[in-house]
Structure formats: structure tokens, C-alpha cells
Image (cartoon, rainbow, N blue to C red):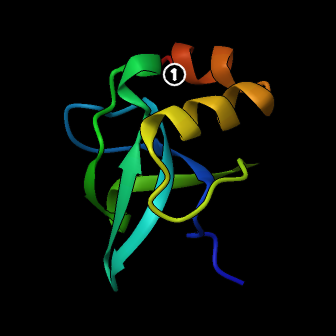
Amino acid sequence: MSAIVIGRVCVKIAGKDASKYCVITDAADGSYVEITGPKALNGVKRRKCNISHIEPTSDIVKIKAKASDEDVLKAVESAKLSDKMKAGLNL
């Protein structure tokens, strides 16, 4: 079972969004996934991301593939993860 699944909450470990949480919204290809914060929640824009630049967490939100930012935000709030995702990691 792979840790890289749609709806998995991850931490960005590289790039300008390092130490911020994101959600996987789609598997782009073998080494890339599409992620979002969503931007309204913590500033992470929807984009492709190399899987070596994210660290999966144990949290998963229930979303469909290619879910909109509004749907992701609703799923994060219903899973009671919005405070955690706003704060990010203190590295």
C-alpha cells in the first residue's frame, strides 16, 4: 500500500512552501503529484510537486481526484485539521 494516495496530508520539505502542510489532489505521473494547501487556508497554491519534496503524514481527508480547492477546504475542516494545517511545522 502506497503512502502517496489522493487525500493524503503531507508536509512540503523543499521549496518556498517548506514546512507547510498540503493535500494530494491527483497523481500526475510516476514522480509527480498535484497538491494544494488550499491557498485560502495556508497559502500553498495548487501545483505539481515532486514526490521527493513531500513527506506523507498519517492524516487523510476524503476527497475525489482533482477536487477543487473549496472541496479540499471543506474536507480539511470536516476532518478537524484546519488549525494544524494553518500553523505548519515550526522548523
Q: Position of residue 66 (x, y in %)?
A: 44, 60
Vertical side of 39 occupied by 21: above or below: below
| Residue that numbered label 1 is attached to | 88
Residue at left offset 28%, top offset 35%: 45
Work out whether 87 lies above or below 20: above
**Residue at 47% over, 57% down:** 25
- Residue 65 shown left or right of residue 19 in the figure: right
| Left or right: 61, with 89 as reference point | right
**What residue appears at the point 49 percent right and 52 percent down from the top-left corner?**
67
Decide which of 24, 67 is in the foreground and name it: 67
Choose top left, top right, bottom left or bottom right for residue 7: bottom right
- Residue 23 spot, x, y in % from top left: 52, 46
The answer to whether 31 is drawn above or below residue 20 in the figure is: below
Q: Quadrant of the N terminus?
A: bottom right
Q: Residue at x 28, y 58 (%)?
A: 49
- The quarter of the rendered structure image containing the C terminus is top left
Percent x, y for residue 4?
Answer: 56, 70
Kindly give the residue lying farthest to the left in the view shown.
16
Q: Nearer the viewer, residue 62 or 83?
A: 62
- Residue type beneath disc 1: Gly
> What SS does tag 1 mark?
loop
Please count the marks in the image.
1
Residue 5 locus on image (x, y percent): 60, 69
Q: Does 21 sit above or below residue 5?
A: above
Would residue 36 appear left or right of 14 to someone viewing this image? right
Residue found at the far right of this picture: 79
Left or right relative to 88: residue 12: left
Looking at the picture, tell me which residue is in the foreground, 62 or 89: 62
